[in-house]
Image (tube, coloured by chain):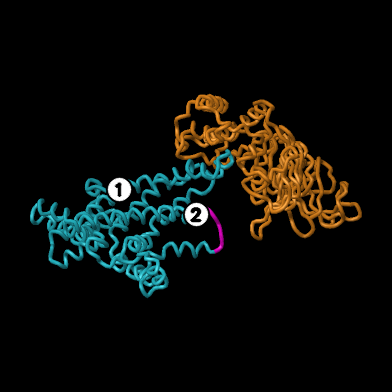
Chain colours: A orange, B cyan
Amino acid sequence: MKGCNRVTIELKNIVKKFGAFTALDDVDLKIADGELLALLGPSGSGKTTLLRIIAGLDWPDHGEVSFDGENALTRGAGERQVGFVFQHYALFRHMTVFENVAFGLRVQPRAVRKDEAGIRARVKELLDLVQLDWLSDRYPSQLSGGQRQRIALARALAIAPRILLLDEPFGALDAKVRKELRRWLRSLHEEINVTSVFVTHDQEEALEVANRVVVMDKGRIEQVGTPGEVYDRPASAFVHGFIGESIVLPVNVCEGRVWIGDQPLDIAANGAGPGPSNLFVRRHDMQVASEGIGLRGAVRHVRTFGAIQRADIAVSAGGSETLIEIDTPRDRQLKLGEVVELQPRRFRIFSA
Amino acid sequence: MTDGQLSWRPAKADVRSEPRLVRTIIIALTVLFLTVFVVLPLLIVFAQAFSRGAVAYLAALAEPEAVSAIKLTLIVAAISVGLNLVFGLIAAWAIAKFEFPGKTFLITLVDLPFSVSPVISGLVFVLLFGAQGYFGPWLQSHDIRILFAVPGIALATTFVTFPFVARALIPLMHEQGTLEEEAALSLGASGLQTFFRVTLPNIKWGVLYGVLLCNARAMGEFGAVSVVSGHIRGETNTMPLLVEILYNEYQFVAAFAIASLLAMLALITLIAKTVLERHLDEGLQPRDD
């Protein structure tokens, strides 16, 4: 099945409303042939709705969906040759694992349907692929979560889909199984190389598994990029806050200078417009320095574990105080109450 | 809790539960009530039916009038169960799987036959199809008999028993949701394939449960049928109607012989219901995934 079934997906101006709630607000997205793409966002960001629109399980109020330049909206879910893996698997509970996987083959029109031996061979092949052929006579209720997930995937692959869509594929699994399945999904994608899109709210999952990440919020796409790009160069305050752990400090940009309260900071505004803004720094990028940029705070609490010490530091910004958490090496011992200079190695400023 | 557990602290009973005396009294009252009001009458039906021996019992059932009543009852039950199976499935499908304005009203409407007295239900059909009713004159001029004939009895019975199948299926289908259907559709199944391969197998125990209760009520219905039947002997008397007629004519053995058939139907229904409920519980179990 290698390489024979790949497709480019193009979404244009997709709008979808549920009553007064706007699930998707003018979304454009191009998904390249053979890529493994993650739709990442908090709940309510519209990521699952977008996935269901690609699958043909939901219809946009407005906009275009095309597969390889062909309009997909004139075709129903069954005609799109899309493999969909549901968040809760949606295995047919009255069928054995074998029959679940065989379903897509059995409902094909008689003209193209395989004979019984052909179906058996194909199901066997798929169950081997997900390494669960020994479970073929069991019912879904007798399987563990991870096993159900893999059977759901085998069932979706049975119809030789041109696109594989996965809705929160690891959402319902415990942490250990999730880690294993992530690695497994990546290698499976390398093996079968079908254009795949998965939805997740877990940034670690998206960054680890996908080739490209689409960060969504409130029905809009905030940023599209490789995992490295969205982590290192977040395009908006939302992306910075949502991906990775961030320290956020309220600052003011005035005449190209950055102020925290009435204290000017010795850093460039990086093109941020004038007015109230937020300074974003990754936790591991905030260091304690001997002389800093004008950013200082009092140590409130120190916890030590392993090679690092984690400290709560109260930074006074104007009238109020902001408590931030930083990780520093243990060679510079922090004492309670001590006032330290802080220096961000890397930072970004976004208008508030 | 057993006596053995109680013995090591006899002064004070287990505070987590009612005192033993209270429990014993409550259970005894329940058993007594059920014996007097349910078991005893049932036994009397059979005792009366066989009071002149098995020969008289069988002879009473072989009477032409009895045979005709049994036949009519079976025909009417078959028609109304068949219709309600189809309408109940459709109604449950609409209510459980779609969102549309007026849905709550529709659910209330499904329940209407349960909240209306069966006699009123029968009267509705008299008002519609009777000689003075809306369609009466037209029906008469075209020589179509609905009232005082099988169609009227079947209609009234169908009306009274409508909620059973729908009621059994709505919570089941609602609980199961539409995910499996969506999965089937995305795998390329047509609407009909999805219904017969995914939806129906998932609700089959619920369907059987609804059919069972619907059938029991259809065969036992008295009020509505009494109004529309016209009590034509050997023609429009169902079993419950015949029981009343025979009883009023002091033919106790015959009356109770027919009644015993209905009682047996009730017992079989009860057993089947217990079995089905066990299967239904399995189907209703929340997915633990």
Magenta-drawn stretch contains B100: yes
User: How much space separates mark 2 and mark 1, taking CA atoms?
Assistant: 26 Å
* Range drawn in magenta: B97-101
Instruction: Residue B14: give x, y in percent of width and height.
Output: 28, 53
Height in image: A132 above or below A276?
above
Please state which of residues A329 and B138 is positioned toward the viewer in this rendering.
Answer: B138
The residue drawn where x is 78% and y is 38% is: A229
* Dot 1 alpha-carbon crowd within 10 angstroms: few under 14, some 14 to 19, many 20 or more: some
Characterize the magenta stretch by its predominant secondary structure. loop
| Residue type, label 2 | Ala
**Secondary element at image label 2:** helix
- In the rendered structure, the answer to whether residue A24 lies left or right of residue A78 reads right
**Secondary element at image label 1:** helix
The residue drawn where x is 38% and y is 57% is: B164
Query: Which label belongs to residue B96?
Result: 2
The part of the image, by quadrant, that contains residue A347 is top right
Magenta-drawn stretch contains A115: no
Q: Earlier in the sequence, mark 2 or mark 1?
A: 2
Instruction: Residue B112: give x, y in percent of width and height.
Output: 41, 65
Query: Which label belongs to residue B272?
Result: 1
**For the view shown, which residue lies furthest in the left direction?**
B52
| Residue type, label 1 | Ala
The residue drawn where x is 20% and y is 57% is: B66
* Dot 2 alpha-carbon crowd within 10 angstroms: few under 14, some 14 to 19, many 20 or more: many
**For the view shown, which residue lies furthest in the bottom direction?**
B132
**For the view shown, which residue lies furthest in the right direction?**
A255
The part of the image, by quadrant, that contains residue B111 is bottom left
Height in image: A41 above or below B252?
above
The residue drawn where x is 84% and y is 44% is: A292
